[in-house]
Image (tube, helix red, strand yellow):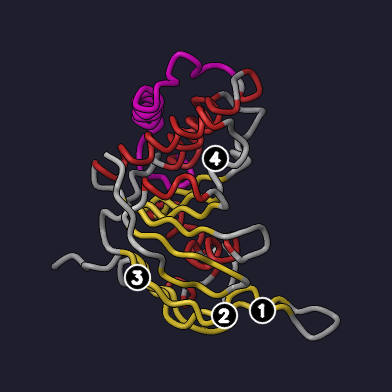
């Protein structure tokens, strides 16, 4: 079967959250396409709808209208359980707050999504997790708890975890928001390296200073998405 040329496609996506006064529209007729190997940045202020957009792409939340397709799969036509399994196997998600389990070691945080999806035997999953930790230069801390390493190191662990099931698509929600500028630059270099090795990356952020990393840039303002002028790509 020939592989789709489109990784992610949103068509006329709307999301309204009900309120006592009638509802707040977080996304307004959002449409865009991401091709394989792109590093797409969506920039917007707090409250613009960035996290809502991430939740539509990953199927974490339901949409009000429109369609989301990822590699030909209509995400919101799946049941909740189907979406959970699909997301674990095909999408790697990196959050601003890391979302690591502090009662588990760094290594076990990376092993967990492998075991959840049942793609590898236990021994193999631990070996692969160590390889991922080495790839993001954090392997020496594998047996520590997340609280014993720095914020930048925790984000490296979160990236390794996002890669656990070798997804082709990485979705990042403000992944540098809790980091200082130097550490943020290091994390962005990691993402760029993943993109150069063939991963497709969608990142939402409020930080305009990261624009040179992206192959395509969008602005999200009060739920409305607009394409921004192309900038010189960082090498």
**Dot 2: what SS?**
strand
Please state which of residues 60 and 159 is positioned toward the viewer in this rendering.
159
- Name the residue located 48 percent from the left edge and 30 percent from the top edge: 156
Residue found farthest to the top: 140
| Residue carrying label 3 | 33
Q: Residues within 10 Å of mark 4 (few under 14, many from 20)?
A: many
Q: Are marks 1 and 2 in contact (CB under 8 Å)?
A: yes
Q: Position of residue 65 (x, y in %)?
A: 54, 84
Q: Are marks 2 and 4 in contact (CB under 8 Å)?
A: no
Using the numbered discs, state the Cα–Cα distance from disc 1 to disc 4 in whole angstroms.
27 Å
**Dot 1: what SS?**
strand
| Residue carrying label 2 | 28
Q: Residues within 10 Å of mark 2 (few under 14, many from 20)?
A: some
Q: Position of residue 39 (x, y in %)?
A: 34, 52
| Residue carrying label 4 | 176
Please state which of residues 217 and 69 is positioned toward the viewer in this rendering.
217
Let me know if residue 126 is in the magenta part.
yes
Mark 3 or mark 4, which is nearer the start of the sequence? 3
| Residue carrying label 1 | 25
Q: Work out which quarter of the rendered image holds the N terminus and state it.
A: bottom left
- Name the residue located 80 percent from the left edge and 78 percent from the top edge: 19
């Amino acid at each position: 079967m020939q592989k789709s040329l489109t990784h992610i496609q949103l068509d006329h996506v709307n999301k309204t959250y009900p309120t006592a006064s009638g509802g707040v529209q977080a996304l307004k007729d959002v449409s865009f396409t991401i091709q394989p190997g792109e590093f797409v940045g969506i920039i917007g202020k707090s409250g613009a709808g960035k996290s809502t957009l991430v939740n539509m792409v990953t199927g974490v939340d339901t949409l009000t209208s429109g369609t989301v397709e990822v590699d030909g799969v209509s995400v919101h036509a799946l049941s909740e359980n189907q979406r959970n399994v699909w997301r674990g196997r095909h999408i790697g998600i990196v959050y601003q707050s890391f979302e690591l389990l502090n009662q588990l070691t760094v290594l076990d945080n990376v092993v967990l999504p492998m075991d959840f999806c049942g793609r590898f035997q236990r021994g193999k999953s631990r070996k692969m997790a160590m390889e991922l930790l080495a790839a993001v230069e954090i392997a020496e801390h594998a047996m520590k708890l997340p609280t014993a390493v720095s914020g930048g190191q925790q984000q490296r662990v979160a990236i390794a975890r996002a890669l656990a099931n070798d997804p082709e698509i990485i979705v990042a929600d403000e992944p540098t928001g809790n980091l200082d500028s130097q550490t943020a630059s290091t994390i962005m270099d990691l993402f760029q390296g993943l993109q150069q090795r063939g991963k497709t990356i969608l990142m939402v952020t409020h930080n305009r200073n990261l624009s040179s990393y992206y192959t395509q840039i969008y602005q999200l303002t009060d739920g409305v998405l607009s394409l921004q002028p192309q900038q010189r790509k960082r090498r």
